[in-house]
């Protein structure tokens, strides 16, 4: 009887033992996330570091001061969301949608956002150092006083974007559409603007233009340039445009 009681006690203890997070001796991959519909939800201050948000709908969500470093959010919808001061460093945002969103003062260093949509977004004071933004759409976006050192915006749509007082040192804008863009007092040392058409753009007060690459770039008669800086008119082979600062 004593042996039987002992055996039953051992079996009972084993039945309540915590289960190991393994399946067939292999660790179980666990990736938390808010995938799916979370429109208008409140994620303010939440720690979502490393989570998967890919393909989810977070339109109009509250994400102020959220910790989102390294999140996987390709094709996610953040339209009109408030991500003021959010930390998204190293996030994967390929083809994500941020049109109308607030990303002011956000930490976006090293994000991968090729083809992402930032139309009319508020990105004032945000840090986009080293960001991969090839083909991204920043039409009418406000990037005033943002930091974009070494960011790659090749082929991006910057139509009507505000880049006034931004730091663009070493950034790449090759082939970007900068029609109507404003770069007043921007710092552009070592930046590359190859083949950019600055139609109706405002480039007055740019700093470091003599150290930037404007190969193949051109302007229109309505473009405002620094007083001592010239670029050829679009549609002409070599004719320089000596357009006075406005």
Image: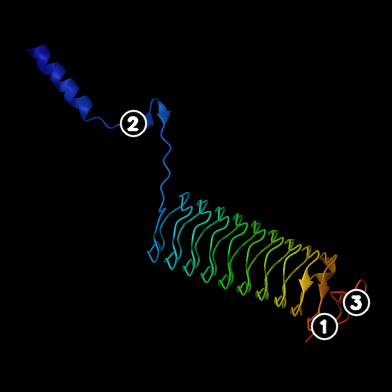
Q: Dot 1: within a 10 Å radius of its alpha carbon, few (fewer than 14), some, or many (20 or more) residues?
A: some
| Residue 43: percent from left, percent from top | 40, 61
Mark 2–mark 3 contact, CB under 8 Å?
Answer: no
**From mark 1 to mark 2, how far is it between C-alphas?**
71 Å
Q: Which mark is residue 181?
A: none
Labels 2, 3: front one: 3
Mark 1, residue position: 221
26 in relation to 207, above or below: above
Percent from the top left, x then y, of residue 204? 76, 80
Instruction: Decide if residue 244 is on the left or right side of residue 153.
Output: right
- The picture places residue 119, in percent across and down from the top left corner, at 58, 70
Q: Residue at x 55, y 61 (%)?
A: 107
Residue tagged by mark 3? Answer: 240
The picture quadrant where one finds residue 222 is bottom right
Question: Looking at the picture, how far across and down is residue 191, in whole percent?
Answer: 77, 63
Which is in the foreground here, disc 1 or disc 2? 1
Q: 227 left or right of 2?
A: right
Q: Nearer the viewer, residue 71 or 170?
A: 71
Q: How did the renderer colour the structure?
A: rainbow
Residue under label 2:
20
The answer to which image quadrant residue 64 occupies is: bottom left
Secondary structure beneath dot 3 equals strand
Q: Nearer the viewer, residue 84 or 231?
A: 231
Q: Nearer the viewer, residue 162 or 232?
A: 232
Which residue is found at the position 21% from the left and 27% from the top? Answer: 15
- For label 3, the crowd category at 10 Å Cα-Cα, with few meaning under 14, some 14 to 19 and many 20 or more, is some
Q: Is 150 located above or below residue 14 in the figure?
A: below
Image height of 200 relative to 46, above or below: below
Left or right: 6, with 78 as reference point? left
């Amino acid at each position: 009887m004593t042996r039987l009681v002992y055996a039953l006690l051992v079996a009972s203890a084993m039945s309540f033992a915590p289960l190991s997070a393994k399946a067939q001796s292999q660790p179980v991959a666990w990736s938390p996330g808010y995938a799916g519909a979370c429109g208008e939800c409140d994620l303010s201050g939440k720690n979502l570091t490393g989570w998967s948000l890919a393909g989810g709908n977070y339109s109009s969500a509250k994400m102020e001061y959220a910790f989102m470093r390294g999140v996987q959010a390709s094709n996610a919808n953040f339209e009109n969301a408030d991500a003021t001061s959010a930390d998204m460093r190293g996030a994967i945002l390929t083809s994500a949608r941020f049109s109308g969103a607030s990303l002011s003062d956000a930490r976006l260093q090293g994000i991968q956002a090729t083809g992402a949509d930032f139309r009319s977004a508020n990105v004032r004071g945000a840090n986009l150092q080293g960001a991969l933004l090839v083909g991204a759409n920043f039409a009418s976006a406000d990037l005033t006083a943002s930091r974009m050192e070494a960011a790659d915006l090749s082929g991006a749509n910057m139509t009507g974007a505000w880049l006034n007082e931004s730091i663009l040192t070493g950034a790449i804008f090759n082939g970007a559409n900068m029609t109507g863009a404003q770069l007043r007092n921007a710092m552009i040392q070592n930046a590359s603007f190859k083949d950019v058409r600055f139609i109706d753009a405002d480039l007055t007060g740019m700093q470091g233009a003599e150290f930037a690459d404007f190969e193949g770039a051109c302007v229109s008669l309505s473009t405002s340039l620094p007083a001592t800086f010239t670029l050829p008119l679009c549609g002409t082979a070599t004719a320089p445009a000596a357009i006075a600062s406005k």
